[in-house]
Image: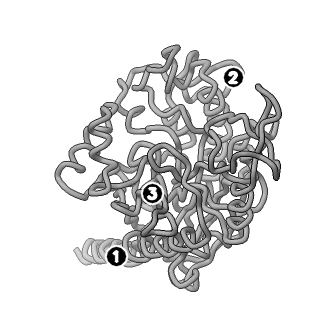
């Protein structure tokens, strides 16, 4: 009897110690939408403010002091007929009002930085933050509360201007080694112009446990298997010949390789960021739907085989330590937003529904749901049942041009809403 009581006491003590050693932290991901540090922003404004001319029909618009239009007045968009490298500087139509580019001023960008800092401090308030579309570490420090005084920040200066970064509170986490750029995700074998973004990882010791974080910003424009629209009916169909989907398809193998290899030797893994793919829509497909055009998701990669489902392909649970749980996303703003976010997990919202969700009195951001995700493998748990919450930007998500009463425009802080979750590490 004494032995049984001793064993029971030891078990209770072990459980109590385990619970006590767990540390609750808030993690967040936020795509800041072409966010530039101050010196680079100054250069960008000057570049967009210069004159351009078009020598002849069919040729590119190019800088010309005698030109008729500024960069703010040109027609941009994908593959714009303009002499411009968007790998180095954003296009001039990042901020638009009534579908026209808004000329940006230094004062407007300074106001936007203050607003981002306020959102991060009062609404996001995270211990670990993954950023996408930031130009540098300095760009992140400029928008962290108190200039990042309480945070460590890491990023990189290679690749293109849409970069990634991490920030974490010194009082909560300590880095184990430095940040690592995962270049294979950028498909370096392709021409530079056609390369997407790399990944970025950092390993943090939090509450005695070691957790590896990976942030991604995958290829855009191949969002949902439920879309099926587009002129050729292939929009969103990952295994199709759609140009954007082919690039995203090529990113699956390196992403899965990272997860298989780097999930080992740590207590937990958190993968978060802008996946540019609606994982909830993929999860809504029948469980027996084929993941690959040939073979199983757990089979070794074979050239020529395509996947129909990003998440089931990458997150196939082999090895076991690589199995992640994608957190459910909620919009705890009001009853309508909550319902729309729930409905959006299994179907594509129609235009009026999306307008209600993106309205300034609701979430406010132009890309409110379906792109940003947090997936986890936690120490001692799977993360099942945990929820990631959208942070509403409201009126901070709108852009208004300058006017007689307002000499500087008001710029949306981002086209994405932050996503945050409370985790036990």
Residue carrying label 3: 399
**What crowding class fits label 2: few (fewer than 14 Cα within 10 Å), some (14-19), or many (20 or more)?**
few
Q: Residue 125 at x, y = what percent?
A: 42, 74
Q: Is residue 25 visible?
A: no
Horizontal side of residue 139 vs 113, given as left or right: right
Residue neighbourhood size for the residue with mark 3, other residues' Cα within 10 Å, grouped as few (<14), some (14–19), many (≥20): some
**Quadrant (top left, top right, bottom left, bottom right) of the C terminus:** bottom left
Q: Secondary structure at mark 1?
A: helix
Which comes before the other along the chain, label 2 or label 3? 2
Q: Nearer the viewer, residue 307 or 120?
A: 120
* x, y percent for residue 91: 66, 48
Q: Which residue is mark 1?
A: 10
Residue at image position (64%, 58%) is 164
Q: Residue at x 68, y 34 (%)?
A: 79
Q: Which mark is residue 80?
A: none
Question: How far apart are labels 3 and 1 at the CA level?
Answer: 60 Å
For marks 2 and 3, give the CA distance. 47 Å
Q: Say if mark 2 contacts mark 3, CB within 8 Å.
A: no
Q: Looking at the image, is 143 positioned above or below residue 98? A: below
Q: Which mark is residue 302?
A: 2
Looking at the rendered structure, the secondary structure element under dot 2 is loop
Left or right? Give the position of 58 relative to 343.
right
Nearest the camera: 384 or 30?
30
Q: Are marks 2 and 1 in contact (CB under 8 Å)?
A: no
């Amino acid at each position: 009897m004494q032995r049984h009581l001793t064993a029971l006491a030891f078990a209770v003590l072990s459980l109590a110690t385990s619970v006590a050693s767990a540390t609750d932290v808030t993690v967040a991901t936020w795509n800041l939408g072409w966010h530039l540090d101050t010196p680079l922003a100054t250069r960008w404004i000057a570049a967009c403010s210069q004159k351009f001319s078009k020598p002849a029909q069919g040729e590119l618009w190019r800088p010309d002091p005698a030109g008729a239009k500024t960069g703010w007045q040109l027609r941009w968009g994908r593959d714009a007929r303009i002499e411009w490298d968007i790998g180095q500087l954003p296009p001039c139509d990042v901020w638009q009002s009534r579908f026209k580019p808004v000329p940006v001023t230094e004062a407007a960008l300074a106001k936007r930085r203050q607003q981002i800092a306020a959102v991060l401090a009062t609404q996001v308030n995270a211990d670990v933050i993954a950023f996408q579309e930031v130009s540098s570490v300095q760009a992140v420090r400029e928008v962290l509360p108190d200039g990042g005084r309480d945070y460590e920040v890491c990023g990189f200066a290679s690749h293109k201007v849409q970069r990634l970064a991490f920030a974490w509170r010194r009082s909560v986490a300590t880095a184990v080694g430095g940040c690592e750029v995962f270049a294979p995700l950028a498909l370096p074998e392709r021409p530079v112009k056609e390369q997407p973004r790399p990944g970025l990882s950092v390993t943090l010791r939090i509450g005695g446990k070691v957790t590896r974080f990976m942030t991604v910003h995958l290829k855009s424009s191949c969002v949902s298997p439920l879309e099926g629209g587009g002129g050729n009916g292939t929009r969103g169909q990952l295994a199709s010949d759609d140009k954007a989907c082919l690039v995203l398809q090529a990113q699956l193998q390196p992403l899965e390789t990272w997860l298989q290899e780097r999930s080992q030797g740590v207590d937990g893994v958190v993968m978060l960021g802008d996946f540019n793919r609606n994982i909830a829509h993929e999860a809504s497909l029948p469980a027996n739907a084929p993941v690959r055009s040939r073979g199983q998701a757990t089979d070794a990669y074979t050239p020529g085989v395509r996947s129909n489902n990003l998440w089931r392909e990458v997150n196939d649970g082999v090895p076991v330590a690589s199995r992640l749980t994608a957190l459910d996303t909620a919009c705890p703003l009001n009853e309508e937003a909550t319902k729309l976010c729930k409905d959006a997990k299994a179907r594509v919202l129609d235009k009026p529904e999306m307008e209600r969700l993106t309205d300034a009195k609701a979430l406010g951001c132009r890309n409110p749901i379906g792109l940003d995700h947090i997936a986890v493998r936690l120490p001692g748990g799977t993360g099942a049942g945990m929820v990631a919450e959208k942070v509403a930007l409201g009126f901070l998500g709108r852009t208004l041009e300058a006017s007689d009463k307002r000499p500087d425009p008001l710029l949306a802080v981002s086209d994405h809403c932050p996503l945050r979750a409370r985790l036990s590490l």
